[in-house]
Image (cartoon, grey):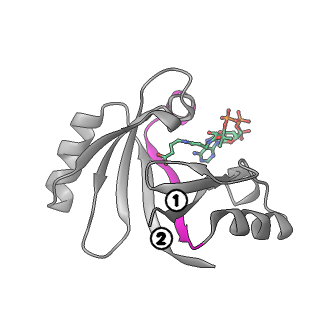
Amino acid sequence: MIKRVHHIGIAVNNLKESAALFKKVLGVKAHYHDAPCQKVSEAVFKIGKGAEIDLVEPTGPESAVAKYLEKRGEGLHHIAFEVDNVDKELKNMEGKGIQLIDKAGREGVAGKIGFLHPKSLGGVLTELVQPRE
Ligand code: CMX
């Protein structure tokens, strides 16, 4: 079951510059971390009880985000939904005819994650997140 929108990922070329802009607009400070498993650095804004806004900058040309920026430029990159059990939800989504990028959950920064292909979801790259206990 989808529980809530966990975060919205925005692809940026320069994390520091974009974080300064978003800080001005959102009125909260970001925390920064690297996500080597995704080959990105992130600035995460927590806004009240709502979904996080994650700015993502690629750490190298082989990053999925680097390819995205090259092809489409900066902008909305993905939406992430929180789930109880990522493996179960991936199977569930496959059963609904959604194309999976990940056949099984893998470790990410926020917990166990799995991606659904944008081609089968109206052009929206979608991540399922099972937060760490
Ligand atoms: N949103 C929407 N469409 C996207 C997309 C995105 N974020 N990234 C790629 N696409 C589109 C491409 O533009 C392409 O469209 P066209 O065929 O119309 O040109 C299509 O998807 C397929 O592209 P591709 O060349 O076959 O595949 P890519 O090598 O570009 O890979 C994808 C696309 C989604 C499979 C890959 O980016 C991926 O595995 N992403 C999941 C992991 C990820 O994005 N991690 C980044 C950070 C995550 C985090 O911070 O949590």
Q: Is residue 15 above or below residue 8?
A: above
Magenta region includes residue 80: yes
- 97 with respect to 41 (left or right): right
> Which segment is the magenta one?
69-84
Marks 2 and 1 close (CB-CB < 8 Å): yes
**Is residue 80 or residue 1 the one in the foreground?**
1
User: Which x, y percent locates residue 21?
Assistant: 20, 46
Name the N-terminal-most of marks 2 and 1. 2
Q: Is residue 56 above or below residue 4?
A: above
Where ligand 1 lies, by quadrant?
top right
Q: Identify the residue shown where x is 26% and y is 41%.
A: 18
| Residue at the (44%, 48%) spot, across then down | 109
Give the residue drawn at x 38%, y 68%.
Answer: 51
Q: Which residue is mark 2?
A: 5
Circle 1 is placed at which residue position?
A: 79
Q: Quick one: SS at disc 1?
A: strand
Q: Amino acid at mark 2?
A: Val
Image disc number at residue 45: none
Label 2 secondary element: strand
